[in-house]
Image (cartoon, rainbow, N blue to C red):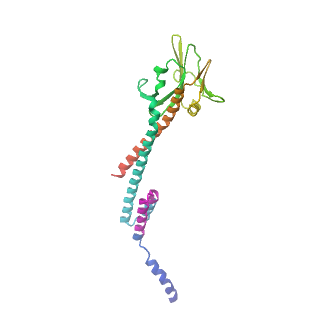
């Protein structure tokens, strides 16, 4: 028995000389600080969450961990804010050259819309073409606009070039998305292709804007045009602008959320 006790004595001494719980907690806190200073915020937060849960009986160390956790959350949100600011500047730089041919107008309804300079109603009243529609929120669609001396009752369009073509969905006359009006001998037909009813035509035009695309207006009668270059550019640029405007709106929304979170953390 005496020999066994002599053998266990060194082990008991080692155990008794190990770090105290306070020292263990301080070590974890030091590790979390090191991770934070190195920019590893998530790893630091995991370390602190573990410390707070494991060392509830050490209020001073637990409070220090909670304070550091708040500091890390503030640093994290500040970094997010800086990233969003940079992203916003980058998107606005992309937007600027695309906007050179668009004007913001409130002349055609209660909501301001973006119109390509060459597609303003006063420039396009008496021609057959495809128009780009864009608002400040980035909502985008195209419409087919027919002008002539006889009705063709068109409900659909096909855009084509050489052996490639894209056919829209049929949009039946409803007085809104497919409507007609006349003035004396002249007839006008306007069809809006909203909610994807262009069926890929916008993508086709955007990807082939530098080619002489042709359009077939299809209904009881038919009309054929070769798209003007500025109409192709209006659809291409309007389409691209729509993505950028939506991304800018998303960034601004996220910035608002981050700022609100920072205000709560800094109280």
Boundaries of the magenta span: 24-45
Residue 33 place in picture, x, y as percent: 41, 62
For this orientation, the residue located farthest to the left is 267
Q: Is residue 191 visible?
A: no
| Residue 196 located left or right of residue 80 | right
Residue at 52 percent across and 30 percent down: it is 233
Please say if 229 is above or below 52. Answer: above
Q: Nearer the viewer, residue 7 or 201?
A: 201
Where residue 146 sits, quadrant-wise, is top right
Residue 222 place in picture, x, y as percent: 62, 19
Magenta segment main secondary structure: helix
Magenta span includes 110: no
Residue 107 place in picture, x, y as percent: 41, 23
Q: Is residue 33 visible?
A: yes
For this orientation, the residue located farthest to the top is 184
Please say if 212 is above or below 182. Answer: below
Magenta span includes 29: yes
Where residue 225 sits, quadrant-wise, is top right
| Residue 259 located left or right of residue 141 | left
Q: Nearer the viewer, residue 147 or 76?
A: 147
For this orientation, the residue located farthest to the right is 163
Q: How many marks?
A: 0
Residue at 38 percent across and 65 percent down: it is 61
Residue 42 place in picture, x, y as percent: 46, 57
């Amino acid at each position: 028995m005496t020999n066994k006790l002599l053998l266990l004595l060194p082990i008991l001494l080692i155990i008794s000389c190990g770090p105290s719980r306070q020292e263990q907690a301080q070590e974890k806190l030091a590790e979390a600080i090191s991770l934070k200073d190195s920019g590893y915020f998530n790893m630091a937060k995991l370390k602190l969450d573990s410390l707070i849960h494991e060392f509830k009986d050490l209020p001073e160390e637990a409070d220090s961990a909670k304070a550091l956790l708040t500091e890390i959350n503030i640093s994290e949100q500040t970094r997010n804010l800086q990233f969003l600011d940079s992203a916003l500047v980058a998107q606005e730089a992309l937007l600027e050259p695309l906007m050179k041919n668009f004007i913001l107008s409130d002349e055609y309804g209660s909501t301001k819309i973006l119109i390509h300079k060459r597609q303003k109603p006063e420039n396009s009243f008496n021609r057959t073409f495809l128009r780009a529609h864009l608002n400040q929120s980035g909502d985008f669609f195209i419409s087919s606009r027919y002008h002539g001396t006889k009705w063709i009752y068109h409900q659909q369009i096909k855009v084509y070039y050489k052996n490639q073509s894209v056919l829209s969905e049929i949009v039946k006359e409803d007085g809104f998305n497919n409507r007609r009006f006349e003035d004396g001998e002249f007839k006008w037909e306007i069809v809006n292709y909203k909610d994807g009813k262009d069926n890929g035509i916008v993508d086709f035009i955007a990807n082939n804007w530098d080619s002489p695309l042709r359009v077939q207006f299809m209904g009881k009668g038919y009309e054929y045009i070769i798209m003007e270059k500025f109409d192709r550019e209006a659809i291409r640029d309007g389409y691209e602008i729509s993505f950028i405007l939506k991304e800018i709106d998303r960034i601004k929304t996220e910035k608002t959320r981050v700022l609100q979170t920072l205000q709560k953390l800094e109280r």
